[in-house]
Amino acid sequence: MRILELSSKDDKDGRRRVKVILHEIYKDKSQHNKNGITWLEEYCKNNLESVKGISITCEFTNDERTEILGHGETGIEDGVPILEDATMIGVLERGYIDDIVVDGESKRALIGEGYIDAMRYKAFVNVLEEKIKANETIFGSVEIIGTRKNGNRIKYLNGYQEIGRIPTEYRYS
């Protein structure tokens, strides 16, 4: 995940609108991300609706809630990651696929739009704002889980592979 935009003002309800790249979508099976996943558009489209309502979370490392460590994962139960050390700081309200320019290069991507709760995480939002103003790239990650009909297991085209695995049936989480 990569933050594209953070609105310059709070909404009247204390939310800061955010637009993020959840992941790049590849043209063919020969490409993959650093985690070995090949995101293909047809499968992303099939699972697009699951972006709506997913939480934006992080694990804070300090009491001021400005520095983050990761997912906050504390284990896996029945194929579902348990993230008890994570704090929900916002929500994605919609996802869509579009062409965007990143670092001067055109890419196809799954984009999420939503908000961060700026009333409760003002210091964190201020840090994000400073980093964006300094042209610092802010990275995170997107998680997927299996569907209930598949016993909470992610289905992959041609099975699980360390490099080049193609998720086909899953939910964004």
Image (cartoon, rainbow, N blue to C red):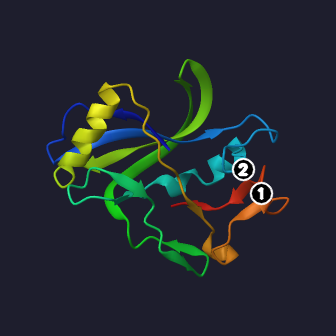
Crowding near the residue tagged with mark 2, few <14, some 14–19, many ≥20 C-alpha atoms within 10 Å? some
Which of these two is toward me, 3 or 45? 3
Count of all numbered marks drawn on residues in the image: 2
Tag 2 residue: 36
Seen in the image, is 18 located left or right of residue 161?
left
Q: Position of residue 160 (x, y in %)?
A: 79, 62
Seen in the image, is 105 located left or right of residue 37?
left
Q: Where is residue 159 in the image (x, y as percent from the top left)?
A: 82, 63
Tag 1 residue: 162
- Is the Cβ of the residue at disc 2 closer than 8 Å to that at disc 1? yes
- Kindly give the residue lying farthest to the top in the view shown: 104
Q: Position of residue 86 (x, y in %)?
A: 38, 65
Residue at left offset 38%, top offset 25%: 135
Badge 2 or badge 1: first in the primary sequence: 2
- Kindly give the residue lying farthest to the front in the view shown: 62
Q: The residue tagged with tag 2: helix, strand or loop?
A: loop
Q: The residue tagged with tag 1: helix, strand or loop?
A: loop
Crowding near the residue tagged with mark 1, few <14, some 14–19, many ≥20 C-alpha atoms within 10 Å? few
Which corner quadrant of the image does residue 60 belong to? bottom left
Q: How far apart are marks 2 and 1 (CA)?
A: 6 Å
